[in-house]
Amino acid sequence: MEYQDIAIGLDVGTTKIVAMVGRRNEYNKIEILGIGRSKSVGVHRGVVNNITQTIEAIREAVSEAEHSSGLKIKEVIVGIAGQHIRSLQHNDYITRLDFENVISQKDIQKLIDQVHKLVMQPGEEIIHVLPQEYKVDSQAEIVEPIGMYGSRLEANFHVVVGQISSIRNIGICVKAAGLNLSGMTLEPLASAEAVLSTEEREAGVALVDIGGGTTDIAIFKDNIIRHTAVIPFGGNVITENIKTDCLIIERQAELLKIKFGSAWPGENKETEIVCIPGLRGRDPKEISLKHLSQMIHTRVCEILEQVNVEIKNYGNEEQKKRLIAGLVMTGGGSQLKHVRPLTEYITGMDVRIGYSNEHIAGGENGLISHPEYATSIGLVIKGLDDKKKYLCTNVDMVHKHDENYEFISTKFYNKNRRLNSEEDQKKKKNKKKSKSFLEIWADKFRQILNDTE
C-alpha cells in the first residue's frame, strides 16, 4: 500500500472530532481503512475557543484512527466552518497580451490569483475562490475556456471568506497535535462531495448539513456552486433548550432528543410520558413526550426558517434558478424523527436524507455512511482528488513510500517537511515555473501557520 493512495480527513466539529483514513479501490469507491472519534470540548459553533482541549481531542481521534487503520498519520485535510464564514459574488477579468495563443490554465490561474488579492474586511482571509462561469471577449456562459482564443478573460466567482484568527487557531491545533496540514475545505463543500449526485448538482439542489453547532448550506445549479452559508446554530440549541426547560443534565437531554424526540408534535399524545432518573438520591422526573416534541419543533423550525431565507437569497423563486432536485439533508441533526416532512412543509421542496452509500465500498460500512460522517467522508474524497490532480502534473516526482508509509516528493510531500523552513520558501518564490492551484494553497496555509510561531 502506497501513501499517495491514502487521504486522511479531519472533521473538527462542535460535538465531535472525527479522523477518517480512506483510499479508492479498483472500482473507484472509497474504502475506509480506519476511523477515530473523540468528544469535542474545545469548539463552540465551529470555532475553536480552547486550544489545549482541542489539541487533546484531535490527538485522541487520530490515535484511534491510527490503531484501527494500522497506519501512521502524518498529514490531514481539515474541514472548516463556523459562524465567522461568509460568502460573496465577485466578477473580475484579465487582458491577455498574447491573445494570438489559446487560453491556458496559466491564464485561469492568473485570474484566480487576482481575485485572491481582493481587500477584505479587517481580520478576514479568503478561503476559497470558486470560478462559476467564464466570458471570453463577447462570448458569455462558458464553462471551460481553456483552448479558446480571446484577448479578455472574465469570470464570475463565488468567494468564501473567514476570520484569520479562526483559521489560524485550527492550524495551530493541527500542528500542535503533531500533524501537517495539507489543506482546508469548507465543510458544506466536503459534505456535498459525499452525498450529492452529479444529476442533482446539474438540476439544482440545496445541501443542508445540520451539525452540532452550525447548519451549513451549499447550493448547486448546472454543476456549479452558486451559494454557501453557515447558520450559527444547529442541534446543540435543541439539546440546550431541553436541558434548560426540563432541568436535566446535558447527557440526559441529548439521549432524550435522540430516543424520544420528534420534530412533529402532532405524533405524540398527552398521555405519553418518559421517566428520567434523578441525580444521586433525587426523585426521577416525568417528561411529557408531547411537550418534548413541541420544544424540538420550535427550534427545528427556527433553523429551517433560516435555511429558507438563504435559499430565497440565492434566488430560487426565479424560474432559471429553480432547484429542481430540491433539498438534501445530512449531518446528525437530519436524523431527528419527522424532520424530513417538516422541512418539506416549511420549504415547499422535495427533501431526501443524504447518505454516503454510493461512495463507500462494502456493505459492512452502514454506520460509516451515516449522515453524521458525511463531512469526514467528503474530506477524504477531496484529499484523494487533490492528490490525484497533483500527481497528474508531477508524475516524474513520485517515489516509493518508506516503511512508515510516508509519501515522498521533492516538491510537496517532502520526507523531512523542509518546505516549512524560510530557506525553502525563498527558493520557491524565486522559481520562474508557474505553480499549480494546490501548491499555491499549500504555500498559503503554511505561511498562516508560520506567522503564528
Image (cartoon, rainbow, N blue to C red):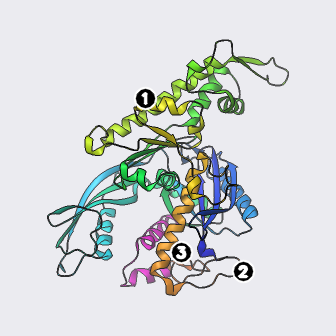
Decide: is 333 above or below 178.
above
Numbered badge on residue 403 = 2
Q: Residue at 50% across / 60% down in the picture?
A: 184
Mark 2 or 1: the one toward you: 1
Residue 362 visible from this viewpoint: yes
Disc 2 from disc 1: Cα separation: 55 Å
Decide: is 402 above or below 84.
below
Residue 123 visible from this viewpoint: no
The question of residue 449 being in magenta is answered with: yes
Secondary structure, mark 3, is helix
Q: Position of residue 225 (x, y in %)?
A: 37, 53
Q: Position of residue 135 (x, y in %)?
A: 21, 63
Label 1 or label 3, whichever comes before in sequence order: 1
Q: Nearer the viewer, residue 71 or 280?
A: 71
340 with respect to 289 (left or right): left
**Which residue in the protein does label 1 denote?**
346
Q: Nearer the viewer, residue 95 or 330?
A: 330
Mark 1 or 3: the one toward you: 1
Numbered badge on residue 420 = 3
**Magenta-colored span:** 424-453
Numbered badge on residue 229 = none
Q: Position of residue 321 (x, y in %)?
A: 29, 45
The kind of residue tagged 3 is: Asn
